[in-house]
Amino acid sequence: MDGNGRWAKRRHLPRAMGHQRGVEAVRKLVRSLKDTGVECLTLYAFSSENWKRPGEEVDDLMNLMRKFIKSDLPEFVANDVQLRIIGDWQGLAPDIVEMLEDALEQTSKGSRLLAVALNYGSQQEIVRAAAKAAADGEVTEQAIAAHLDTADLPPLDLLIRTSGEVRLSNFLLWQSAYAEMMFVDTLWPDFTPEHLQRALAEFEGRDRRYGGR
Ligand code: FPP
């Protein structure tokens, strides 16, 4: 979900406003999931590298997270959304961990998966998974995949990065081995359910060969 800062800068607004509008884009997208065939939407909300940002911005993002969980949890439950978290989320502030545990519990029966990457870094995730596989005595592709944070999620089909940047920034590196990629210029706060529908239509037209022919 890249481009919140630039969205705000173009409007001479504080960065926090960009993140706030980013949350609104998330809300609309989650509401639209029922009109798509998307089984699981995974959002990169906070990376393990985002701690390098100024303390004030990190605080703004954490406060947005608190507000978002509080305000939107009842809607998730009502709309059949099941929350999942990937990343080292136990390393977040204790009150957020508690809120997330409650949200996971309350949404556990939902059929539409919303995975949020929090304190997430893909390289760290792969190292953790490989270490667990080694401890079990078997370092194979299957064993590593089984220990990734995404082990219980469906395979990644489509990865979209907003804001015109063309890199993965430590997101789902293992999982994107055969994922289709889309890099769109739209800044995250401007990314609407219609943008997602268009991306899905383009995805339908892609020829996926998984190395075969
Ligand atoms: C990248 O934009 C965005 C982030 C680091 C945070 C994304 C977080 C949200 C949209 C809100 C929190 C999410 C939830 C689910 C509550 P940037 O700041 O790097 O933008 P820039 O590259 O234009 O400066």
Image: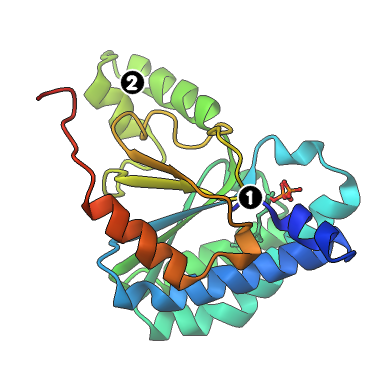
Mark 1 residue's CB less than 8 Å from ligand 1: yes
For disc 2, the marked residue is 133
Could you say which quadrant of the image residue 111 lies in? bottom left
Disc 2 to disc 1, C-alpha distance: 33 Å
For the point 55% across and 64% down, the residue is 191
Horizontal side, residue 204 vs residue 83: left or right: left
What amino acid is labelled 2 in the image?
A: Ala
Horizontal side, residue 169 vs residue 31: left or right: right
Q: Position of residue 105 (x, y in %)?
A: 44, 68
For the point 84% across and 66% down, the residue is 11
Mark 1 Cα shell of 10 Å, populated few (<14), some (14-19), many (≥20): many
Q: Is residue 63 visible?
A: no
Tell us which disc is closer to us: 2 or 1. Answer: 1
Could you say which quadrant of the image residue 211 lies in? top left
Quarter of the image with the C terminus is top left
Q: Which mark is residue 154?
A: none
Q: Is residue 107 above or below residue 91?
A: below
For the point 30% across and 30% down, the residue is 145
For disc 1, the marked residue is 2
Q: Quadrant of ligand 1?
A: bottom right
For marks 2 and 1, the one nearer the N-term is 1
Q: Is residue 25 visible?
A: yes
What amino acid is labelled 1 in the image?
A: Asp
Residue nearest the viewer, comparing 13 with 144:
13
Q: Position of residue 95 (x, y in %)?
A: 70, 62
Q: Position of residue 102 (x, y in %)?
A: 53, 69
For the point 65% across and 37% down, the residue is 48
Could you say which quadrant of the image residue 136 lies in? top left
